[in-house]
Image (tube, rainbow, N blue to C red):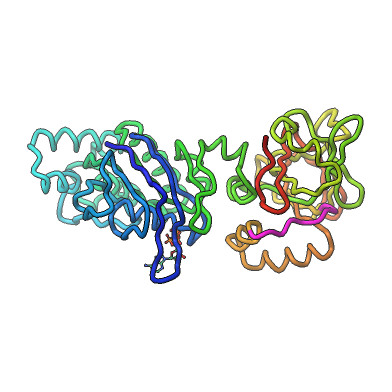
Amino acid sequence: MARVSFDQVRKVYGDDTVAVQDLSLEIPDGELIVLVGPSGCGKTTALRMVAGLEVITEGEIRIGDRVVNGLPPRDRDVAMVFQNYALYPHKTVYENLSFPLKLRKLSRRDIDDRVRRIARVLELEEQLPRKPGQLSGGQRQRVAMGRAMIREPYAYLMDEPLSNLDAKLRTQMRAEIGLLHKELGVTTIYVTHDQVEAMTLGERVAVMRRGELQQVAAPQELYNRPANLFVAGFIGSPAMNFFLGRVSEEADGIWVSFGDGQRLEVDEHERSLAPALSGMDGKGLIVGVRPEHLQDAALVSGAPANRRLKGLVKLRELLGSEVVVHFEVQAAPVVTDAVLEIAEDVDESALSELDHRRQERRTHFVGRFGVDSPSKDGETAEIAVAAGALRFFDLESGARLAA
Ligand code: ATP
């Protein structure tokens, strides 16, 4: 086991495709870190440079205390875990699991200890004498995972290892990986484009965009204090709602106004997160609020008048435990590069819709309301904004307003 570090690492493919820019990241010994970001952000390239499968253009990568830039893959002692695994059909589960250790000439006793340990964690003890053909899909996947992970290398490098599985198996395997990591404590770098996977699995999560590291933090920190608009929009599902607002400092406090005369008072927690708000009287900014922090005001007893907005309900999706309500607020939508990129990542048609709304100064919002919400399609609803839920971002840079 070892720490892994990137020091100002840059990767250029050919003459001009910059896949990774100036990446500096310290991964302590034993940590499970997730690299996450949309397609093409450079996360796989970063991982492959650690494995030695891509040449590093500039900077240094260390595994333990060794700079590995010039070291061939086999001398780095890391294990790559990919999405496609093949098992040996004529070998038993035991033989499949023990194979990588036999190659390394471990003693029989050591091999047996490790096979039983990994089989226990992956709940494969009863399957050890069976052949792959006698296993369920999920069991086969676990054997494959176990085989990739049975060695105890300096680090595991995992590139979307679960992306071929159906949703249920994926959730189950994700939990297994978490457990396995707890048990074995091997430094792990896990790459995914799925923010839910990143948030549930990572001890820390590193968000990348266009080759650049945006923020690295514990999941809750990313959620509560995103560094910028991109991280705020990427982490969380459904995504954070954004709209344009204007600050007004009044005798009774700081407010943000938007659209046709609506306004929200900024509460104490929000002000403490964004002290730069005072002194911005009259200035525009981007306001963000998550769907789970919006509620039908009819369901909140004593919802304060200074924390409400009005929205025209467009669509209600009943999910049993909640209703996801899409509504439109008279406020100018936010159209920045980051927002466009997130929209594009979701769906191409989202782009033209965004453009249309911009012209009409209407912003699409999503709220997660209680199932008893009396809101109806085509009607205006009063929506309560939870305490401490508003986040503010700079119009130009997209950085979250902070101290
Ligand atoms: P995905 O989730 O789609 O795999 P990613 O975030 O892992 O994306 P990378 O595969 O690291 O992204 O790619 C980063 C950038 O480098 C992209 O613009 C990609 O087109 C480019 N790239 C990747 N591999 C090569 C290559 N072998 N030659 C040239 N360009 C490449």
Q: How many marks?
A: 0
Residue 114 appears in which quarter of the rendering?
Answer: top left
From the top left corner, tell me how far across and down residue 137 is, in percent.
33, 52
Residue 288 appears in which quarter of the rendering?
Answer: top right
Q: Is residue 242 above or below residue 343?
A: above
From the top left corner, tell me how far across and down residue 264 is, in percent.
84, 39
User: Is 204 colored magenta in this rendering?
Assistant: no
Residue 301 appears in which quarter of the rendering?
Answer: top right
Which one is nearer the viewer's eye here, 261 or 304?
Answer: 261
Q: Which quadrant would the N terminus be assigned to in this image?
A: top left
Which one is nearer the viewer's eye here, 176 or 272?
Answer: 272
Answer yes or no: is residue 239 visible. Answer: no
Of the four image quadrants, the one with ligand 1 is bottom left
Q: Residue at x 70, y 44 (%)?
A: 291
Q: Residue at x 75, y 40 (%)?
A: 294
Residues in magenta? 329-337
User: Is 336 colored magenta in this rendering?
Assistant: yes
Left or right position of 41 against 237? left
From the top left corner, tell me how far across and down residue 60 is, in percent.
34, 49
From the top left corner, tell me how far across and down residue 360 is, in percent.
84, 63
Magenta span: helix, strand or loop, mainly?
Answer: loop
Q: Is residue 76 above or below residue 222?
A: below
Q: Residue at x 49, y 60 (%)?
A: 39
Left or right position of 47 against 381? left
Left or right position of 200 against 106? right
Left or right position of 121 against 374? left
Which one is nearer the viewer's eye here, 117 or 101?
Answer: 101
Answer yes or no: is residue 71 visible. Answer: yes
Q: Which quadrant would the C terminus be assigned to in this image?
A: top right
Q: Residue at x 78, y 67 (%)?
A: 356
